[in-house]
Image: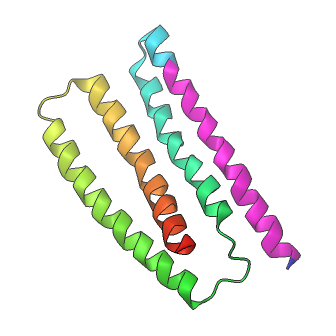
C-alpha cells in the first residue's frame, strides 16, 4: 500500500515538469527556433488530472475507462496528424515547429482529461 501511495505522489510531481514549457517563451526574445520545442513539455500537466483520480487499487471499471481514454486519444492524434499535414503546406518553419510541439503536448492532456471525466461519472 505504501508503494502505491509513493508512486501516486511521484505522478503528482511529474506534473511540475510542465513548467519547463515556459522556456519556450525564450523564442520571443532570442528568435531561436529550437526554443519552440519546449512547448512540448505542456503535456506533463496531464499528470495533475491523472493524480486526482482516486484509484489506489485499480478495478475493472478503471481499466475499461483507461481503454476508452486511449481510444479517444488515438482518434484525436489522427485528427492532429491530418491537421499538421495540411498546415505544413501553409505555415512557415517556426510556426510549424510550434504546432508540432503543441499537438505533441495535447495528447497526454487529452488522455488525462478524458480519463478524469470517465472516472468522475
Relative image position of residue 55 (x, y in whole percent): 68, 76
Looking at the image, is 10 positioned above or below residue 121?
above
Front residue of this view, candidates 100 and 120: 120
Front residue of this view, candidates 117 and 2: 117
- In the picture, the quarter occupied by the N terminus is bottom right
Residue at position x 65%, y 48% in the image: 15
Residue at position x 43%, y 16% in the image: 32
Residue at position x 44%, y 13% in the image: 28
Looking at the image, is 29 positioned above or below residue 26?
above
**Tag count:** 0
> In the figure, residue 37 lies in which quadrant?
top left
Residue 112 part of the magenta-drawn span: no
Work out which residue is located at the far bottom of the displayed protein and give it: 60
Looking at the image, is 25 positioned above or below residue 10?
above
Q: Majority secondary structure of the magenta segment?
A: helix
Front residue of this view, candidates 44 and 30: 44
Residue at position x 64%, y 42% in the image: 17
Looking at the image, is 39 positioned above or below residue 12?
above
Relative side of 96 to 59, left or right:
left
Work out which residue is located at the far top of the displayed protein and give it: 29
> In the figure, residue 67 lies in which quadrant?
bottom left
Q: Which residues are magenta?
A: 2-25
Relative image position of residue 118 (x, y in whole percent): 49, 72
Relative image position of residue 8 (x, y in whole percent): 74, 65
Amino acid at each position: 500500500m505504501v508503494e502505491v501511495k509513493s508512486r501516486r505522489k511521484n505522478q503528482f510531481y511529474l506534473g511540475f515538469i510542465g513548467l519547463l514549457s515556459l522556456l519556450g517563451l525564450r523564442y520571443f526574445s532570442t528568435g531561436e527556433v529550437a526554443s519552440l520545442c519546449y512547448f512540448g513539455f505542456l503535456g506533463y500537466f496531464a499528470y495533475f488530472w491523472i493524480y486526482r483520480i482516486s484509484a489506489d487499487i485499480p478495478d475493472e471499471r478503471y481499466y475499461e475507462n483507461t481503454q476508452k481514454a486511449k481510444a479517444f486519444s488515438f482518434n484525436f492524434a489522427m485528427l492532429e496528424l491530418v491537421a499538421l499535414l495540411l498546415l505544413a503546406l501553409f505555415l512557415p518553419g517556426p510556426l510549424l515547429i510550434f504546432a508540432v510541439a503543441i499537438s505533441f503536448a495535447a495528447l497526454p492532456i487529452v488522455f488525462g482529461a478524458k480519463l478524469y471525466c470517465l472516472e468522475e461519472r
